[in-house]
Image (cartoon, grey):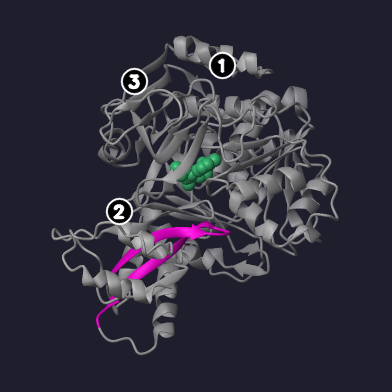
Amino acid sequence: MKKINSFEEYQTEYARSVATPELFWAGKANSFYWYKKWDSVLNWNFNEPNVKWFEGGKLNITENCLDRHLKKRGDKTAITWVPNDPNEVSRHLSYKELHREVCKFSNVLRSNGAKKGDRICLYMPMVPELAIAVLACARIGAIHSVVFAGFSAQSLADRINDATCNIVITADGAFRGVKKIGLKAIVDEGLQQCDTVKKVIVLERTKEEVFMQEGRDVWWHEEMTSISDIRPAEAMNSEDTLFILYTSGSTGKPKGVVHTTAGYMVYAEYSFRNVFQYEDGDVYWCTADIGWITGHSYIIYGPLLAGATTMMFEGVPSYPDAGRFWDIVDKYQVNIFYTAPTAIRALQAKGLGFVKPYKLDSLKVIGTVGEPINEEAWQWYYEHIGKEKCPIVDTWWQTETGGIMISPLAGITDLKPTYATLPLPGIQPCLVDGDGEEIDGNNVSGNLCIKYPWPSMIRTTYGDHERCRQVYFSAYQDKYFTGDGCRRDENGFYRITGRVDDVINVSGHRIGTAEVEDAINTYEKVVESAVVGYPHEIKGQGIYAFVICDEEIKNEDTLKAAILTQVTQVIGPIAKPDKIQVVSGLPKTRSGKIMRRILRKVASGEANNLGDVSTLLDPSVVDKIKQGAI
Ligand code: WT7
């Protein structure tokens, strides 16, 4: 696949993608390997919604990630894995080796009863076997549902049940910094609530002792010995589901975002090559976890489709010290580096002493994703990591979009700190006002929507298509609504300002306030709670919980500790509130709705500027809340 090489080329390509989208995307799709080409490029309506790309086509994404490369770059490193412990040896898997492992593990899956269309849950550490398992699922046509290994047993069980998975792939444990996490024990606990799971495949990683249930649990390494390494890829239809990935919304439980095969594949490679300006031979490192969409699209699929060397890091940025990222960049001569603003801010706070010892001169392009990047962090990243010569690609996208939507193309698009700048070819963003009217012109703000389909967009929410319609396609006629607020400057550059719904973004992790409230409310002493986000120096947003209890609380510290434990058990440590305030009442309207606007102000330390509170049922609760603010 050819990439865009100049801004003029970007403009021409963009214009062509809008004027003749089907021709445009057919051109991109042509560079892949198809068992059978498509009959029609695109059929769509945003009312149901019903979006179909490359219908009639037959393909397998792993044929394109692996087999397609064997002749030309079989011995090239596909995955470089860097362990948590800097003293443990790293691993390098060539395209040939990765292909072989994927074929073998595909056979393991088959011999354990997996077939095309089955849902398989992956709950694993950041080790090459996670990528191997993802690709093996895709190779046999099973649908992978990766659950981030920081989620609790309860969250894991909810996701397994929602997708009715029949196999779980996990490990004995995971290393993360100084911590060791017993993944298998969490799986065992979760599976007490799941009756669809027939097999659990367990990778040995930490070598801690684990319980193995006779007839259900098998060891990865035992299954992999004496199994054939030949496994032709299953011919999939373009619109067959490739994976499900759960993400949080404003209401209810997390929903399973469904991505399908062909469109996702085409867009993953196209966006990867163009945004990062990937060139053959570049070493590429994305620090995300494969449990998130960033890891799916830009650790596994995008880079492997492009035949790149993609790095996987098992550890955390602060271990053994805050220089770890930069140590890895120098050691592996990383050319393209992609991380989250929260990591940049955390490392910036540790001081330049952890950056100075490193050269960082292999870097060509640096990127960010997951949340708005503030100007200070942008400048620090540009100056101290990119040494003022690496373009920063501030990439805006979502689990639902499957790939990067708005971003500079490295070295091609002008940069503007805190701006994701311009849409990729094929992406038609627009801003919409409160009445649902599209806002024309520049120097304007509104809600960000996309008004035309793109190949890697969400197709449905698993098991509940109506929810997909409701959440994304019902707010505005004929538009996909992102949930984000956005500004378009005088040059037409886009700046994403943050969520306009009840979703908060903590360290780049998306957390639904309703989910946290539900978790807090399961604690027996809590009667009601309200959760909002507030600006947090490192995390971007912090979680502030207001709770009402059923009795006078004698020891607030004990109560708070109990709430934190509860949230950790129901969701996971990432959803723990940073601040908990015990209140006697919440600001409610006469119809009983909580006025979150007021709580957000209190949580942000702006309680003196609350605006109109006259519609409240009992305006006096506001004063009490203000007095107790933390
Ligand atoms: C939400 C999506 C996409 C991979 C990681 C997050 C926010 C994402 C940016 C950015 C400002 C951003 C948005 C979006 N977001 N990238 N470059 N600038 N905000 O995926 O968990 O689905 O979250 O993250 O609010 O809606 P996700």
Residue tagged 3: 44
Number of other residues with Cα within 10 Å of mark 2, as a class: few under 14, some 14 to 19, many 20 or more: few
- Based on the displayed image, in which of its 4 quarters is residue 436 positioned? top left
Closer to us: 566 or 57: 566
Lower position in the chain sequence, tag 1 or tag 3:
1
Residue 63 in view in this figure: no
Q: CA distance from mark 2 to mark 1?
A: 38 Å
Spot occupied by residue 20 in the image (x, y as percentages of width and height): 46, 9
**Residue 78 coordinates in the image, percent (x, y):** 72, 37
Rendered residue at 61%/34% (across/down): 416
**Quick check: marks 1 and 3 in contact, CB under 8 Å?**
no
Amino acid type indicated by mark 2: Gly
Mark 1 element type? helix
Name the residue carrying label 1: 28
With respect to residue 469, does 526 lie above or below? below
Image location (x, y in percent) of residue 526: 29, 76
Say above or below: 354 vs 276: below
On residue 385, the disc is none
545 lies left or right of 542: left
Asked whether residue 53 is in view, the answer is: yes
Mark 2 or mark 3, earlier in chain? 3
Cα–Cα span, label 1 and label 3: 19 Å
Q: Quadrant of the C terminus?
A: bottom left
* Magenta span dominant secondary structure: strand
Element assignment for label 3: strand
533 part of magenta stretch: yes
Figure check: 449 above or below 524:
above
The quadrant in which residue 346 appears is bottom right
Q: Which residue is mark 2?
A: 252
Residue segment shown in magenta: 528-550
In terms of depth relative to the viewer, which is nearer, 616 or 188?
A: 616
